[in-house]
Structures are given as structure tokens and as C-alpha cells.
Image (cartoon, rainbow, N blue to C red):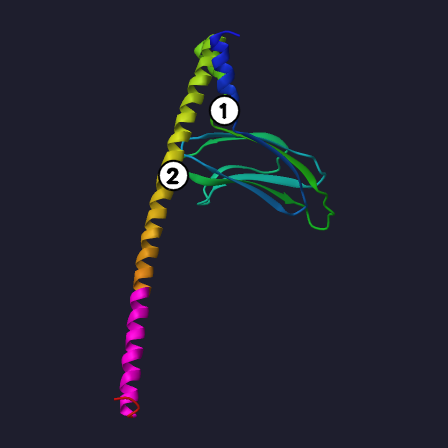
Amino acid sequence: MNNLSYVFALLFIGLPWKAEGIMWFLEPNTQKCLKEELQQNVLVTGDYEVSPAPGQKVNCIVRDSKGHILYQKEDISKARFTFVTETYDIFEVCFASYVPPHQHGIRQEVSLVTKHGIEAKSYEALGEAAKLKPMEVELKRLEDMSESIVQDFSLMRKREEEMRDTNESTNSRVLYFSVFSMCCLLGLATWQVLYLRRFFKAKKLIE
């Protein structure tokens, strides 16, 4: 194995692939939603397929946490959705089954394969459009993967800093609350001693 192939192998082994596939049975007149947290400017694609059922239909909708609809299609069977995230948010993909009244519905099998980030890009089409050689396409893929890794590490460092700031702020608040509680307890104890002393003096139990 030459050096270039060795580098390729190391990169492919160490990279987290961002593709997810799932299959489930959708009961009649029910809805199933899948949620995922995504960063800003991330390309997302999804391929779904629904088993046929006479008289029934399944609708698909993709939206963010604010209710903005990114993709919507009714009476689906097999298709693909694609969108790019504008902000850091939680996105959900929902499949809803509808059965006409007075009809006994049956459950339908739904399969969904989602990809985001590097895995969602079609480098073959990019290579054909830019007339790149196979090695150039592979290098472009590796370059994007490297940038993705750098962004992931940067995000992890940012989150670590946020968690550290939160921990330090929490520790400071706990310390201040503990000091305040001790002062309150000492003040209450002092007041009790003085009150009891005056009480006993008033009853002439002590000098």
C-alpha cells in the first residue's frame, strides 16, 4: 500500500459517517415523527418509501422547531427530500397516515434513510459537472471531510467552553448561597439567644 492510499484508509476509518436508516410500521390514522439536532449550513437529504395500502394515504412533512415547513408532500409512496439548514436547530420529519371513514385501515411499512453533511453531497455529479478526474473528486471529498472534522472539533471546543462557564457560574452561585445561608443561620441563632436571655431575665430566672 502506497502512502496516499494509507492516508485515505486512515481518514475513512477515523471518520464518523453521517448516514442513518430506519424502518417502522405506521399504524392507521397515526403520526410518527423523528427529530434530530443539526448545525447551521448543513445539507440534508432523505430517501423514504411507504408500502402501498388501498384507499389509504401517507403524508410527509419536514419542519424546524419554529414550525417552518421545509418540505411537504401528500399521498407519498417513494421520493426524496433535500434542504439546507439555515440555523442551529432541531428538525423533525413526520409521517402521518390517513384512512377514509368507515374503512378498516392496515399498518404500512415506512423506511427512511437520511444523510447530512459530507454524505449528502453527490461528488460524482460534481465531478461530471466540473470535469474532474476520479482522483480529483476523491481529493475534493477528503478536503470536505477534513473541513467537517475541523468544524466538529471547533464545535466541541465551543460547547466545552460553554459547559465550563456554566459550571463556574453554578459553583459561584452555590458558594454565595452557602455563605448567605450561614449568615442567616448565625443571625437567627444570635436572635434566639438574645430573645431567650431577655425572656429569662423578665421571668427573673437568671441575673
Indicate the position of residue 6 as horizontal and vertical percent values: 50, 12
Helix, strand or loop under label 1: loop
Residue 166 to residue 48: above or below: below
- Residue at 40% x, 34% y: name it: 156
Residue 161 to residue 153: above or below: below
Residue 26 to residue 153: above or below: below
Residue 133 to residue 173: above or below: above
Q: In which quarter of the image is the C terminus?
A: bottom left
What label does residue 6 carry, if any? Answer: none
Q: Mark 2 points at which residue?
A: 160
Indicate the position of residue 1 as horizontal and vertical percent values: 53, 8
Region in magenta: 182-203
Tell whether 198 sits left or right of 132.
left
Along the viewing direction, whichever of 136 and 159 lies nearer the viewer:
159
Tell whether 57 sits left or right of 139.
right
The kind of residue tagged 1 is Leu
Tell me whether circle 2 and circle 1 mark residues in contact (CB < 8 Å): no
Tell us which disc is closer to us: 2 or 1.
2
Q: Name the outermost residue toward the bottom.
A: 204
Total marks placed: 2
Indicate the position of residue 69 as horizontal and vertical percent values: 48, 40
Tell whether 191 sits left or right of 6.
left
Main secondary structure of the magenta stretch: helix
Helix, strand or loop under label 2: helix
Question: Is residue 199 covered in magenta?
Answer: yes
Neighbours of disc 1 within 10 Å: few (<14), some (14-19), many (20+) = few
- Residue at 51% x, 27% y: name it: 16
Along the viewing direction, whichever of 43 and 161 lies nearer the viewer:
161
Q: Examine the rendering and report whether any part of residue 26 can be seen.
A: yes
Q: Quadrant of residue 164?
A: top left
Q: Mark 1 points at which residue?
A: 15
* Distance CA(mark 2)–CA(mark 1): 21 Å
